Amino acid sequence: MRISEKIIRVGLIVMIALSFYFSYMIWLNPTGFNNASTETDTGVNPSVQTYKQKSDLFLPLYLTWNDEEDIKETNSEAVIREIQEVINEATISDLTLRTYGEEQAFSKAQEVNQGISLNYYTTFYLKDYEKTFDKELSLEDESETEDFPFSRIQFDLEENTIQFVDFTHQRVVRGKIDWDKSQVKHLLADNPREWTTMVADKERTSNQYYTQDSIKLKKYSYYSSTQSQSLFREAFFSNPKNVKINDESVDTYYEGGQNMTVLQDQQQVKFETTTDGSDETDLAMLSADYIIRLGNNFGTIRYFDQQDKHLDYRVFVEGYPVFSTGGQGVISVAFSESGQTGSREMTISASLNAIQVPIPSETEIELPSSLSVKNELIAAGADPELLQQIIVGYQWGRSKMHHLLI
């Protein structure tokens, strides 16, 4: 055997060995796993330093397009974000508040031939939208918008109008919008694969449209990781460098009236603090100041639900919320009275588990139309007035190797 052939053969062996080594490092990532699960003593977590933007946290969750007789919806975050950016550059004026005493008149006020709407699953406040997206939204009587809740922003592409819809009290804040309408139409037309055909509820017993046909969603497999306790310490404590560990429990941290407990058995973390505020305090904005500090460690987190003094922020995958039975995929914030004037208690609960590396999957799940689901529930005795929304989402499951979203 010639010397050149020996050199080539040795080179091939080395390349194959390196290939196996790099594959091992990428897929099993032993050093990354150890770093993620080991508490650091530096007092600084670089991943926390890049905060989320509130405009990402409070981005509307789905978009509806009324195109003459056709009704379509998309959960595409990219499309919603692009439409929102056009709105951010628009000028909104002549806002007026109107209350509708009759259901029929209220429904008619929302009818458009050519229009779009950006929607939330829960109520959001006009003053919060104004702060989050840096918009000038004022009425002649500012007190009328101070606590105006809405869950839909509707745009008439023919009349160039905008309205914020409050379904609970049958109210609408309506005005004019000066924007790049051609850009909006281009973005809608340039999104052919993301639309789902919808149908209106003829009985008008809810504030949503329903999927007309069954839909198919891909399963997503993800490797999950256990987040370091230092991530939450750096994000939630006012002075993380001064945090102390309880001598009786290595999983309890405290500093300046703030406490954090890590429940290892449940893979949960609970943070408690006293905040400034009263009954009129803006709870969404107050809680968001803490959630944005988690950065991108949990993937895409969106404002999802608010009931009284309880708020939920959920992980989203491909525009759909993630649900689970063990607390994964949700960050819950609860407020209660502290007993002191001008202050209240805030508790943040979150899972230590986060989905990280996606694994391709060609398996699909077929879901029945949401209208048929609603009809089946009513036939089984459900109260139509209580069926306000039917939400499509992913269920967090677990396999031997990784987590599944189905």
Image (spheres, rainbow, N blue to C red):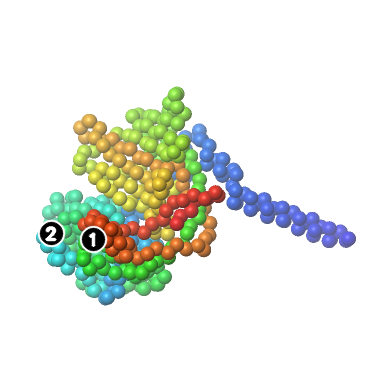
Using the image as rendered, state which of residue 247 and residue 105 is in the foreground.
Answer: 105
Q: Quadrant of residue 13?
A: bottom right
Residue that carries the numbered disc 1 in the rendered image: 206
Image side of residue 111 versus residue 362, left or right: left
**Crowd tier of the residue under label 2, counting other residues whose Cα lies within 10 Å: few below 14, some 14–19, many 20 or above:** few
Residue that carries the numbered disc 2 in the rendered image: 99
Q: Quadrant of residue 59?
A: bottom left
Q: Are marks 2 and 1 in contact (CB under 8 Å)?
A: no
Tell me what residue is drawn at x 36 percent, y 59 percent: 392
Using the image as rendered, state which of residue 181 and residue 392 is in the foreground.
Answer: 392
Q: Is residue 164 visible?
A: no
Tell me what residue is drawn at x 21 percent, y 64 percent: 204
For mark 2, give the secondary structure.
strand
Residue 2 lies, with reference to residue 233, above or below; the image says below
Three-letter amino acid code at the position of disc 2: Thr
Question: What is the residue that sits farthest to the top in this orientation?
Answer: 247
Using the image as rendered, state which of residue 88 and residue 104 is in the foreground.
Answer: 104
* Residue at mark 2 to residue at mark 1: CA–CA distance: 18 Å
Question: What is the residue that sits farthest to the left in this orientation?
Answer: 101
